[in-house]
Amino acid sequence: MQIVYHIGANCTEGDRLLKSLLKNADSFAAQGIKVPGPSKYRRLLRETIQNLDGRAPEPDTRDILLDAILDDESAERLVLSHADFICVPNRIFEGGSFYGLAEFKLASLARLFPEDDLELFLALRNPATFIPAAYSESNAPSPEAFLKGVDPAGIRWSDLVARIRAALPGVPLTVWCNEDTPLLWAQLIREISGVDPLTRILGGFDLLNAIMSPEGMARFLAYLRSHPPQTEVQKRRVIAAFLDKFAISDEVEEVVDLPGWTEETIASLTRSYEEDVWQIERMPGVTLITP
């Protein structure tokens, strides 16, 4: 069986993407692709890993888990999504490192399904906005307590990606930038589910509907009907043009408000992030989805 872990990251539209996947659950199931609701597996997998505490599971653990998740039904591909698969926001900098729990958590998830073909999906986000967003979702009393001594200027997603590849070298890893998700939403649904690129899906414009004004969304859909794009690239250009004119500012403009952070801090973090993504694109075993 193919088992997909969409592992976040935190604060990257994870639950919204899962909701779009779930809209297609019935049609995907007809193709052997199961997208169970989160209540079927999130607590179950978390508690199983906690109880094992690094030990190898019993031989029948896989079958017990799959029976519970799939309700004794069969599947060729199983999609499991949770932004907190690695850790909750409060523990992102556990031990003074960026996602220091990643190797343990991902190895633990892999051990649950030793007979299956695993795939990992991970959204990245500019540290300039990721840190404030994750801090706001944590229960840390201050940014300093949240960062646990980690220098924001030294955060590199490429380091995390390299560690994931080292921990699970045979597992394909697909990544994308959260900043690009409005342009990639339909493709992400298809890539994670594994359906054919031409398969009709529901929810392909869910994110756009949340960040574009009603007038803009109506005009956008009307434009697509009268000028059907011939390629995915053409469609993304249309999306970008309508977002440029009709995006809801409160939904797309992120206010960074952390003590001591200046415009230069944000600009410097952004430059480092862009260079970091360039490095990730060239890493073996990693697929970067771009607009």
Image (spheres, grey):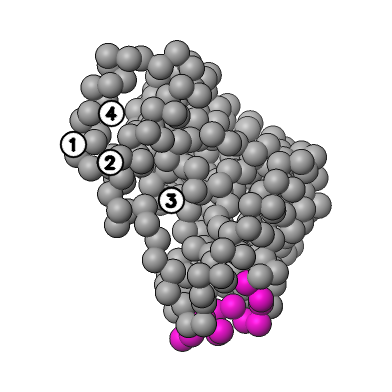
Q: CA distance from mark 3 to mark 1?
A: 23 Å
Q: As shown in the figure, which amino acid type bears the numbered disc 3?
A: Glu
Q: As shown in the figure, which amino acid type bears the numbered disc 1?
A: Glu
Q: Earlier in the sequence, mark 3 or mark 1?
A: 3
Which residue lies at the image location 32% right of the left edge and 15% below the top edge?
Answer: 227
Q: CA distance from mark 2 to mark 3?
A: 20 Å
- Kindly identify which residue carries mark 4: 220
Q: Earlier in the sequence, mark 2 or mark 1?
A: 1
Q: Is residue 240 magenta?
A: no
Q: Position of residue 267 (x, y in %)?
A: 56, 63
Q: As shown in the figure, which amino acid type bears the numbered disc 4?
A: Phe
Q: CA distance from mark 2 to mark 1?
A: 8 Å
Q: Position of residue 42 (x, y in %)?
A: 48, 54
Mark 4 surroundings within 10 Å by alpha-carbon count, few (fewer than 14), some (14 through 19), many (20 or more):
some
Q: Which numbered tag is attached to residue 13?
A: 3
Q: Are marks 2 and 1 in contact (CB under 8 Å)?
A: yes
Q: Position of residue 62 (x, y in %)?
A: 63, 45
Vertical order, 237 against 61 (above or below)? above
Which residue lies at the image location 63% right of the left edge and 72% below the top edge?
Answer: 152
Q: Could you tell me which secondary element the residue under label 3 belongs to? A: loop
- Kindly identify which residue carries mark 2: 246
Q: Is residue 107 visible?
A: no
Q: Could you tell me which secondary element the residue under label 4 belongs to? A: helix
Q: As shown in the figure, which amino acid type bears the numbered disc 2?
A: Phe
- Kindly identify which residue carries mark 1: 215
Residue 116 in the figure: left or right of residue 193: right
Q: Earlier in the sequence, mark 4 or mark 3?
A: 3
Vertical order, 70 against 259 (above or below)? above
Q: CA distance from mark 2 to mark 4?
A: 9 Å
Q: Quadrant of the N terminus?
A: top right
Q: Is residue 14 visible?
A: yes
Mark 3 surroundings within 10 Å by alpha-carbon count, few (fewer than 14), some (14 through 19), many (20 or more):
some
